[in-house]
Image (tube, rainbow, N blue to C red):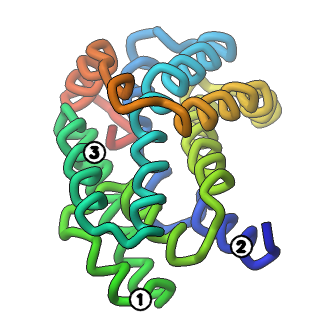
Amino acid sequence: MQAAQLLHLLQIASPALPVGAYSYSQGLEAALEQGMVHDAESAREWIARHLSEIVARWEAPLCWRLMQAFTRRDAQAVAELSERCLASRDTAEFRAESVQMGFSLSRLIAELGIADEGVLAMLDQEVPLPAAYACAVAALGIPHEEALLAMLFSWTENQVLVCVKSVPLGQVAGQKLLLSLQPAIEAAALAAQSIGEADMSNWAPGLSLLSMQHEVQHGRLYRS
């Protein structure tokens, strides 16, 4: 991986990227409210299971396929994968999260001038976040394997930060938690690259129920 590619990757996967990722918990805040997550061990179990059972079987494989489609400039594949991604968002919060961050990232890509018109034309008005991320990866020539790992690490880091603020956990405990999740991140990346179409699934009714309950939860800090 060349230095320029690494620097590009660090920028687009950074928590400081102005797309609003810090304002979403992806159902974790509802789990905290109900006592399902209450300490470091329960936080680790929640994040690891979410990562392996949902992200590695749905969001990550979709992102992997979208990166390949953008690199091939296959507009039809991009459109079909983006549609599947949006259709899988089964609560208002989850859909709004993906669309809002996807829109913010796609607008940032255009304003930074890192993608040509041909690549930008493949982004719909309602673009999910994985599609916008894949567009940036393709435009900047970032290797797909490293980009997938960075996406998974960024997702995991955001979940850990929610726990640091809301369990609450100390900063050192949060870093220990993040470090302990690295094998799970690596396993999720490998699974996302090898999973077949028939095995891809976002089936998680418990998480969907938590998301719907969070929509009316009193005193929320996060938007999902």
Horizontal and vertical percent position of residue 52: 54, 23
Measure the C-alpha gap from mark 3 to mark 2. Answer: 27 Å
Give amino acid for label 3.
Answer: Cys
* Mark 1 Cα shell of 10 Å, populated few (<14), some (14-19), many (≥20): few
Q: Nearer the viewer, residue 14 or 202?
A: 202
Looking at the image, residue 5 sits to the left or right of residue 115; the answer is: right
Disc number for residue 116 = 1
* Distance CA(mark 2)–CA(mark 1): 17 Å
**Mark 3 element type:** helix
* Residue that label 2 marks: 5
> Where does label 3 land, which residue?
85
**Of the residues shown, which amino acid type is indicated by label 1?**
Asp
Q: Position of residue 96 (x, y in %)?
A: 23, 49
Nearer the N terminus, badge 3 or badge 2? 2
Quarter of the image for residue 209 reads top left
Q: What kind of element bears circle 1?
A: loop
